[in-house]
Each structure stands twice: as C-alpha cells, then as structure tokens.
Image (cartoon, helix red, strand yellow):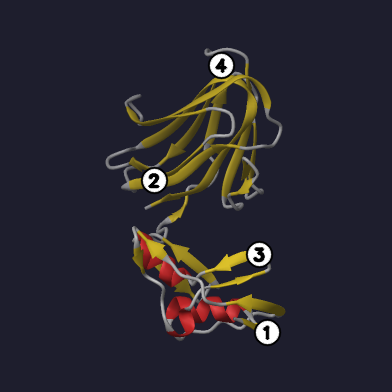
Amino acid sequence: MKKEIKGFVLGLACATLLTGGVAYAASNTVKLEVNYGIKLIQNGIDKTPTGSAKPFIANGNTYVPLSVVSDLVGIKTTWDSNNKSVIIGEKSEGKPLGTPDSIDTDRYPSLSSNQSMVINRNSYGSLGFKINSDHHSKYNYVKLNYALNNRYSELKLSLGIDDEDLINYEFLRNISFKNENGDVLKQVSLGEGSVQENITVNLTGVQKLVIEITGNGHGVIDFINPTIK
C-alpha cells in the first residue's frame, strides 16, 4: 500500500521513534511517497514492529526505526537532546586527549586538530587530530609525549589511515602506547585504508604517556575522538 505523506519531518520521526515521545523538530521538511508492508525477519522469526514504528520503503531506501534495530542487534541507543545526537553504544565520557605536550621525531611530521577524517570514503567526523608523517624505513619514528602525572585511568580512541595524501608503497604504521619506563600498554598496526575502533589503553599509574609511531610509507594517521578519564 502506498501512502503520500505531506510535510513529513524525518528528524521528528526518527527522534520520536527512538525515544518514544521526545521529539526534535527538524528545520527542513521533505515530501515522501512511502511503501508500507515491509517485514523484519531475524533468524527465521518475524519481528516486525506494530503501531507507529512500522518500517517502510521510500525512494528505494528501507527505513527502520533505530530503536527497533537496537533491540534486534542488542546495541544500546539513546537520544542526546542537548547535542541533538543519537548515541549508539556507550556514551564517551572524559575529556579530549588533545595535542601532545611535545613531539620527538626524525621526520618532521605535521599535526592538525579537528579536521575532517575520511577512511575508505567513510566519514569519521572531525573530533581528534591527524598526523601526517613520511617514513622511509622501519627506523623512522614519531613520539607524541603527554604528561599525565598519574591523573587518569584510561584512554579510549579509534585509529585509522586517512584517505588524504596516501601514497601506496608497502604502507604500514605501528602505533605503540607506552609509559614513562617504555613498557608497552597497547600496540596497534594499521595498513592502507584500515581502521580500528573502540581501542582502550589502561593509564592507571602512568606518569607519562608516549605514543610511538613507526613503519613505512607516506600517509596520514587519524586519532579519532581520543578521550581520557
């Protein structure tokens, strides 16, 4: 069955279906012709919701309320009305790591904060910083130094190789998180176009955090939303 909805507000619909009553009025409206009667089948079981949360197809895309998908896949979602954002999974707590107190290097890298991050043509926002370094051998390095003074318990972030300025010749980056004694707290290896999300580094008792970057090739590393608490 097709039904034309005039003045259908996507932002309002998404927020209402997600929170079950808390509405966010979008500034833009669109007119859609929708096709209801879509079923959601999970492991052979019909789990199609009823009422206002029914899925539909419009302009070749299938629309399903985020709250329904959340229940099906077991991932928590919440509506942050203050920031007009949907939080998928756990909300990031703490404060931004920020740029380092000092940098030790033999390659003169460039570092920029809060710039667009794109990996494999997928956007990862702009929270965090990017470091552009040219490594010609495994002996080249960059060390980002942070004085933490035993004030924090953990660092959470995602890491990826940005699409920007990527020159492919056996590209590899090893990112090691170390304490003041050189002990490795966490190590991540990244190749061209790769990304690792939800990395946690234990900072308990750490006086100085050193993020050491080694590897081969020329490219940009994205430090995505690094948060310490």
Q: Which residue is mark 4?
A: 140
- Please tell me whether residue 201 is drawn above or below residue 107 in the rendered image: below
What amino acid is labelled 1 in the image? Glu
Q: Which residue is mark 3?
A: 60
Q: Which residue is mark 1?
A: 4
- Label located before the other in sequence (1 or 4): 1
What amino acid is labelled 2 in the image? Leu
- Label located before the other in sequence (2 or 3): 3
Question: In front: mark 2 or mark 1?
Answer: 1
**Given contact means CB atoms under 8 Å apart, are the residues at marks 3 and 4 in contact?**
no
Q: Which residue is mark 2?
A: 155
The CA span between labels 2 and 3 is 41 Å
Q: Which residue occupies the foreground of this view, 18 or 73?
A: 73
Q: Secondary structure at mark 1?
A: strand
**Which of the 4 image quadrants contains residue 1?**
bottom right
**Given contact means CB atoms under 8 Å apart, are the residues at marks 4 and 2 in contact?**
no
What amino acid is labelled 3 in the image? Gly
What amino acid is labelled 4 in the image? Asn
- Please tell me whether residue 142 is drawn above or below residue 7 in the rendered image: above
Classify mark 4: residues with Cα within 10 Å, few (<14), some (14-19) or many (20+).
some
Q: Secondary structure at mark 3?
A: loop
The CA span between labels 4 and 2 is 25 Å
Asked whether the viewer can see residue 158, the reply is: yes
Please state the horizontal and vertical placement of residue 128, each as a whole percent of the image: 56, 48
Please state the horizontal and vertical placement of residue 111, each as a whole percent of the image: 63, 37
